[in-house]
């Protein structure tokens, strides 16, 4: 077995040259689309609804609407979300299972997409491989800008009872919008998926704040190693094909330091759930839950309380009112890039990292004593 590393075990080494943070370029490119903020709001019901998607788009980011969640199952999803937030801890998982047992309504799929587009937002939507073929015509007709096909683990080759399952190469040729797939954590799986023509790859299995896949199934790879391995596949594929596939680290990011380390590990973007769920504009009422939480037979995730802490603009750009690194995350990334002498995300991929398990606690005894006393 080889040793793998998560965010808490590594640190970024400052560069020999520094750059003014305001002069850094942090754009994320997906196909022919460019986003000034490289953070993707996760396709979770507690994070993204049409209103949030529009608000985030106007700030420069991309939010992904879950088309297999309450927005596509209920005429009045706000009422359903309020019920989830009001449930006790023991009631939460059974209630989620009941709520998500209602059928997806294709009419609502189109309505939600048109709502985002009609209010001036860039629209990204997420479906699982099982429902992609069925919903793609409606998604394209309604005018979505990005299609995300996501599951706990995604591969280019899938064995099932279906005579012909979802073939990503055919999907990418048949839709006129960028296709992002996930999730993957290995070099070989990433490389095979890139060869199908995708525009972006989500990286991460089990690191999310609400996910218990690692606890229930024992599956996953620490996020720094997973990002590095998939980024290596991206670089090799680019050298051979000339096509660049964006690597989007998905899960396990709770602070600005985690974000910065993800980009140093090779990410082009980062998908954020818990941090975004803390925004005033988020629809989860201070709660957050994963898409595997309502599985009817093997729920892998739990509803967690993240609190409503600040407006979305403050979480992104500050000014921060906390010291835990959960606000002004755009400023954190730009500052880290400046300290490392990286003017672009691509240059950030080349900075040095070291194994440093004690980096967060070294010399911080006073901070921890005061935190415990509070």
Image (cartoon, rainbow, N blue to C red):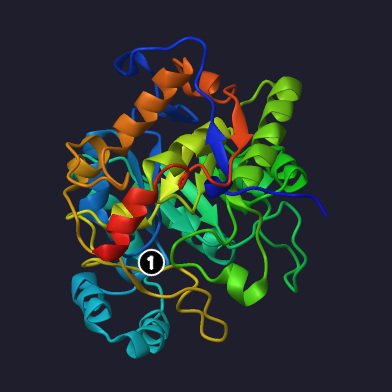
Quarter residue 80 falls in: bottom left
- Report x, y in % for residue 116: 25, 49
Q: Nearer the viewer, residue 210 or 78?
A: 210
Q: Is residue 250 above or below residue 82?
A: above
Identity of the residue drawn at 17% across and 36% down: 319
In the image, what residue occupies the spot 27% across and 48% down?
53
Q: Is residue 62 left or right of residue 301?
A: left
Task: Identify residue for label 1.
Answer: 106
Pick the residue in front: 355 or 210: 355
Please identify the quarter of the rendering in which residue 355 is found: top right
In-front residue for pair 310/67 = 310
Q: Does residue 201 appear left or right of residue 257 in this picture?
A: right
Residue 150 locus on image (x, y percent):
54, 57
Looking at the picture, how far across and down is residue 62, in whole percent?
A: 35, 41
In the rendered structure, the answer to whether residue 229 lies left or right of residue 349 reads: right
The N terminus appears in which quarter of the rendering?
bottom right
Question: Compared with residue 277, is residue 326 higher up or lower down, i.e. above or below?
Answer: above
Res 327 visible: yes
For the residue pair 361 and 63, the one nearer the viewer reads as 361
Using the rendered view, name the quadrant where residue 89 is placed.
Answer: bottom left
The residue positioned 47% from the left and 14% from the top of the image is: 341
Q: How far across and down, in percent of the image, does residue 213 sit?
A: 58, 70
In this rendering, position of residue 308 left or right of residue 371? left
Residue lying at the far top of the rendered structure: 17
User: In the rendered image of this protein, does residue 77 appear above or below residue 62?
Assistant: below
At horizontal 44% and vertical 62% (from top left) the residue drawn is 209
Counting other residues with Cα less than 10 Å from the Cα at mark 1, is it few (<14), some (14-19), or many (20 or more)? some
Q: Is residue 267 visible?
A: no
SS category of the residue bearing label 1: helix
Name the image quarter holding the C terminus: bottom left
């Amino acid at each position: 077995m080889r040793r793998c590393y998560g965010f808490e075990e590594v640190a970024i080494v400052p560069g020999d040259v520094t750059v003014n943070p305001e002069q850094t370029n942090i754009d994320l490119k997906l196909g022919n689309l460019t986003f000034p903020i490289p953070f993707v709001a996760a396709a979770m019901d507690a994070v993204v609804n049409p209103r949030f998607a529009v608000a985030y788009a106007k700030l420069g980011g991309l939010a992904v609407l879950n088309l297999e969640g309450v927005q596509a199952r209920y005429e009045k999803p706000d009422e359903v979300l309020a019920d989830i937030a009001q449930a006790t801890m023991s009631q939460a998982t059974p209630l989620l299972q009941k709520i998500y047992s209602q059928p997806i309504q294709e009419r609502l799929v189109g309505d939600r997409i048109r709502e985002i587009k009609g209010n001036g937002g860039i629209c990204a939507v997420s479906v699982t491989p099982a429902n992609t073929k069925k919903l793609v015509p409606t998604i394209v007709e309604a005018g979505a800008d990005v299609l995300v096909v996501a599951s706990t683990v995604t591969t280019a080759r899938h064995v099932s009872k279906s005579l012909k399952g979802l073939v990503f190469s055919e999907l990418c040729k048949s839709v006129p919008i960028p296709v992002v797939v996930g999730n993957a954590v290995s070099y070989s799986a990433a490389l095979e998926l890139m060869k199908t023509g995708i525009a972006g790859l989500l990286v991460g299995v089990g690191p999310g704040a609400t996910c218990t896949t690692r606890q229930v199934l024992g599956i996953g790879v620490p996020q720094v190693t997973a990002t590095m391995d998939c980024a290596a596949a991206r670089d090799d594929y680019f050298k051979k094909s000339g096509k660049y596939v964006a690597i989007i680290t998905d899960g396990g990011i709770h602070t600005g330091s985690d974000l910065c380390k993800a980009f140093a590990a090779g990410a082009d973007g980062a998908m954020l759930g818990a941090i975004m769920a803390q925004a005033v504009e988020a629809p989860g009422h201070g709660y957050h839950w994963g898409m595997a939480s309502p599985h009817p037979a093997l729920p892998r995730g739990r509803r967690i309380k993240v609190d409503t802490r600040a407006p979305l603009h403050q979480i992104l750009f500050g000014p921060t009112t906390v010291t835990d690194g959960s606000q002004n995350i755009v400023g954190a990334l730009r500052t880290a890039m400046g300290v490392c002498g990286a003017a672009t995300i691509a240059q950030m991929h080349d900075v040095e990292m070291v194994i440093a398990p004690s980096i967060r606690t070294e010399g911080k005894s006073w901070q921890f004593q005061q935190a415990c006393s509070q």
